[in-house]
Amino acid sequence: DGGITQSPKYLFRKEGQNVTLSCEQNLNHDAMYWYRQDPGQGLRLIYYSQIVNDFQKGDIAEGYSVSREKKESFPLTVTSAQKNPTAFYLCASKGGSSSYEQYFGPGTRLTVT
Amino acid sequence: AQTVTQSQPEMSVQEAETVTLSCTYDTSENNYYLFWYKQPPSRQMILVIRQEAYKQQNATENRFSVNFQKAAKSFSLKISDSQLGDTAMYFCAFMKHHRGGSNYKLTFGKGTLLTVNP
């Protein structure tokens, strides 16, 4: 089945540790996105990538890093520099320039203590 | 920068009745897209309906329809014959229309929690 997978569903880390969230898609989509969701908030864009080996900062990129070495994969690293990393993280992808719909993965809930 | 405002943090409706969720947005763009996404308790984001700003006709998808008022920058969602499975957080979102490669960034409102009561 085509879709977007994010693993794991729940992730726990100690403060000061970097952690990488996985996002994989088999939709052959060019663009991929990472969003953060906090209680009572909409989704906020962290990073996005339109093609392999290229990515841009979104609205809240500080404390995060990404890579896009393969079309199918767009991992997000939450670094120790991120002040409030506990949140729900959603990955999305979008097809070519004629398509404007973003399709979302199931999300990863990260808890840092 | 674009902003999206959903003024109703929570709403409730009886099963089989109709409910309308409000959304307003602020932009200087003329061409754009508007979306309603649903996030049920599973937290999976699901696209409910979309509207192209250049289209005057309001979009409909089965029991879901929108009232798009471009001049007023308003984009409300009407859910008819509400079902228990409609219980979810609903997000309104905005995207600029782009020519060629660009970021297609979505700007979201803070959401409206809709509860459908039996």
Image (cartoon, coloured by chain):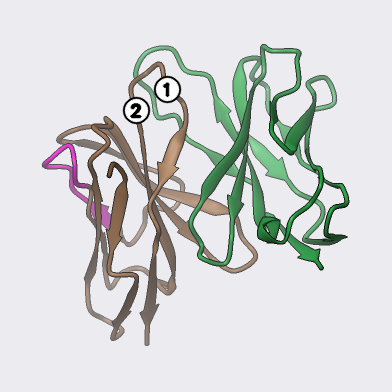
Chain colours: A brown, B green
Left or right position of B24 against A12:
right
Q: Residue at x 15, y 36 (%)?
A: A53
Q: Is residue B98 magenta?
A: no
Q: Chain of mark 2?
A: A
CB within 8 Å, label 1 to label 2: yes
Spatial separation of the CA atoms under disc 1 and disc 2: 6 Å
The residue at which mark 1 appears reads as: A99
**Towards the viewer: A44 or B48:** B48
Magenta-colored span: A65-73
The image quarter in which residue A68 lies: top left
Which residue is at 40% across, 29% downward?
A: B103
The C terminus of chain B: image quadrant: bottom right
The quadrant of the rendering that contains the N terminus of chain B is top right
Q: Is A48 left or right of B2, judged from the image as shown? A: left
**Taking the image as drawn, is residue B114 in sight?**
yes
Secondary element under disc 1, as helix, strand or loop, is loop
Query: Is residue A82 toward the left or the right of residue A87 in the image?
Result: left
Identify the amino acid type marked 2. Gly
Disc 2 is placed on an element classified as loop
Where's residue A22, x and y in %? 23, 59
On screen, residue B104 versus residue A3, left or right, reads: right
Q: Which residue is mark 2?
A: A95
Instruction: Give x and y (percent) for residue B70.
Output: 78, 21
In the image, is residue A70 part of the stretch drawn in magenta?
yes
